[in-house]
Image: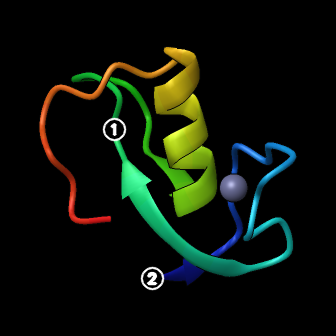
Amino acid sequence: MWGICEVQTDACSAKNGGLITAIWSSPGRKQVNVCTECYEHKKETGEWIVREPKNI
Ligand SMILES: [Zn+2]
């Protein structure tokens, strides 16, 4: 979907709007809109542990 990325890493492709996906890091946490670049970055740095595949 189209929106503004909430993660905003250096590699972000949707700082001012772009293709993003809504993810939930764990039950009860709020939704986070993230672009593909930030999503991959968070996974690579280990900040986010992805337990199930997302259609991103
Ligand atoms: Zn981003």
> In the rendered structure, which disc, 2 or 1, sits on the residue that comes first in sequence?
2
Above/below status of 44 relative to 18 = above
Q: Nearer the viewer, residue 28 or 1?
A: 1
Q: Residue at x 79, y 53 (%)?
A: 11
Q: How is the image coloured?
A: rainbow
Q: Is residue 40 left or right of residue 29?
A: right
**Marks 2 and 1, how far apart in space?**
15 Å
Q: Is residue 35 visible?
A: no
Residue type, numbered disc 1: Trp
Q: Is residue 42 left or right of residue 25?
A: right
Percent position (x, y) of residue 14?
A: 73, 70
Quadrant location of residue 51?
top left
Q: Which residue is mark 2?
A: 1
Q: Quadrant of ligand 1?
A: bottom right
Above/below status of 38 relative to 22 = above
Percent position (x, y) of residue 42?
A: 56, 31
Q: Are marks 2 and 1 in contact (CB under 8 Å)?
A: no
Quadrant location of residue 34?
bottom right
Query: Which mark is on residue 24?
Result: 1
Residue type, numbered disc 2: Met
Could you tell me which secondary element the residue under label 2 belongs to? Answer: loop
Percent position (x, y) of residue 17?
A: 75, 79
Q: Is residue 29 visible?
A: yes
Percent position (x, y) of residue 5?
A: 68, 59
Q: Residue at x 43, y 64 (%)?
A: 21
**Residue lying farthest to the front in this orientation:** 44
Q: Nearer the viewer, residue 30 or 43?
A: 43
Q: Could you classify mark 1 by the number of other residues whose Cα lies within 10 Å: few (under 14), some (14-19), or many (20 or more)?
A: few
